[in-house]
Image (cartoon, grey):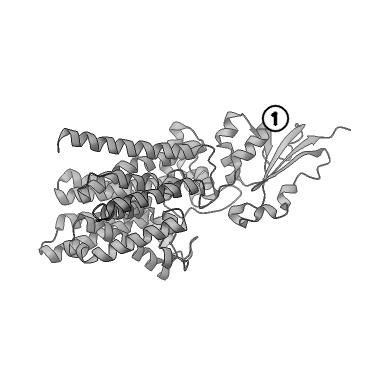
Amino acid sequence: MNSIANKKIIFYYTFITICALLMRLLLLHNKDSWHDEWHTIYVSDPLIDFNATLARYWGDKGDTFLTEFYPPLYLFLLKYFFYFFGYKEIVGNIFSIIFGTLTMPLILYLYQTIYKNDKFYFIGILLIGNLFLLWHSLEIRAHSIVTFFSILSLILFLKILEKTSLFKYIFYFFISIITITLWPITLTIYFGKCIFILIKYFQDKKFQWTLVSNLIAIFIFYVALNYEYLFFNIARETHYTTIYKTFFINYHFRSFFGSIIAGAIFLALFSYFLIKKAKVIILENNYSSIIVYVILGTYFLTLLYSLIRAPIMAPKYVIFILPLILMFISHYVEINKYRTGLKITLSAIILVNLLVNYKNYQIKSPPLTQALEIIIENGGKNLITPENDVFNNYIMTKNTFIKNNLLFINNKDAGALEKLDYFWFLCMNNPSFAKGKESFKLPEETACKKFDNLKDFQIDKFIKIEDFIIKSYMRIYN
């Protein structure tokens, strides 16, 4: 490859990665977290020791109890990131953004390696404009880092197939252990790899003993490291997710592409290419076949586990197959005789979908930043809530709270109000994530009336916004 071609490829890699980063930073402005992220922040507190972190992971959340059912590795990585860069919500967002952004050049490299294609315009549009990857690159959850390591493990697997070396095997071994330990559902990736090796054996009559031994060692080592977590979760017969009938209509594509229309179009396109090329994919059994085996294997195994054990059918649980779906679609669009029209049309759909839905998060976060700004604009300083330790801890990690030197009053301290003449009360009132879209119309919750009958204070201001009731109380002097 000549130097001009190399410079062109580097330009595309850099341009697409920077665009992806800018999109994520744009959405980061005034972003609030949702329930699961509050718990992630609470468990990953860098100010507590290892054992206390584990206790929180297993369910001890102060005045509440809730076990985290995903592996703890991500939480400890985040804990040390908080330790070095500050215990703030935005630092947790940045941790995810880093991996979400770095995943972009990895996907481009995997695409180039598999399809021998250096046309990055269309795959770049699909990656930059994909709402699901964008949204989850901002969440303080494991999905972003899981996608990064999943793509990296696939790249290393292909590099071993190209040319083996001891260094590649060792590196692949450790990256694989990290990937599965972060997210056990990524074992479906290794199922896809095993299908590829098996078909390759029947074709070439040559068994890849070293590679298979490496995969077996990875599995044994993973089980040995994570046996406690595995036994705990395999024993569970229930989960937060369920199998919806609509899954058999949209196959997560509605979520993957951020809207019903975009999801339907890309599902139809993926299905068409898959059916049309099925025979070639199996008979040729090349690198591009691995992508298909991983995608279909992931759908098959997660559905099978959901039917016989516990439902794990949330789209975010299998986010790592989304880049593979985008690669598959992009490749077959690029080699289609109608490729110019298809690329223009599909790019327009992606960009319009992005502009229309970029803030329509699938799970709405309570607008805590807005609530805090209302308090600050009204000269508020002392803040008290009736909420649990997890939510109160989340409030204190908000950049808005820290920058404006707000003071948090412990709601469990009976004498806390004795020295105050004025304080603000922030109460979560019928939050939409729990009560639905019409929750704003519901009456005030009892917890939000906690201080209404204090004999020494009276309500000075009452403000109601989505998910919150905000009140200020003034001391009465006789």
Say which of 50 and 39 sits in front.
39
Residue 262 sits in which quadrant? bottom left
The answer to which image quadrant residue 1 occupies is: top left
Q: Which residue is drawn at 33% across and 60% down?
A: 270
What secondary structure is marked by label 1? loop
The quadrant of the rendering that contains the C terminus is: top right
Which residue is painted at 46% across and 64% down in the image?
A: 236
Residue 448 in the image: x percent, y percent? 72, 48
Camera-side residue: 83 or 130?
130
Q: Mark 1 points at which residue?
A: 379
Percent x, y for residue 237?
Answer: 46, 66
Residue 283 to residue 417: above or below: below
Residue 256 percent location from the top left of the image: 41, 54
- Does the rendering let one see residue 141? no
- Pick out the residue farthest to the left: 205
Asked if residue 462 lies left or right of residue 326, the reply is: right
For badge 1, the amino acid type reads Gly
The relative height of residue 461 versus residue 156 in the rendered view (above or below) is above
Residue 145 lies left or right of residue 357; in this view the side is left
- The number of callouts visible is 1
The image shows residue 75 at horizontal and vertical percentages of: 44, 45
- Residue drawn at 56 percent across, 41 percent down: 394
- For this orientation, the residue located farthest to the right is 478
User: Does residue 324 sit above or below 90 in this rendering?
Assistant: below
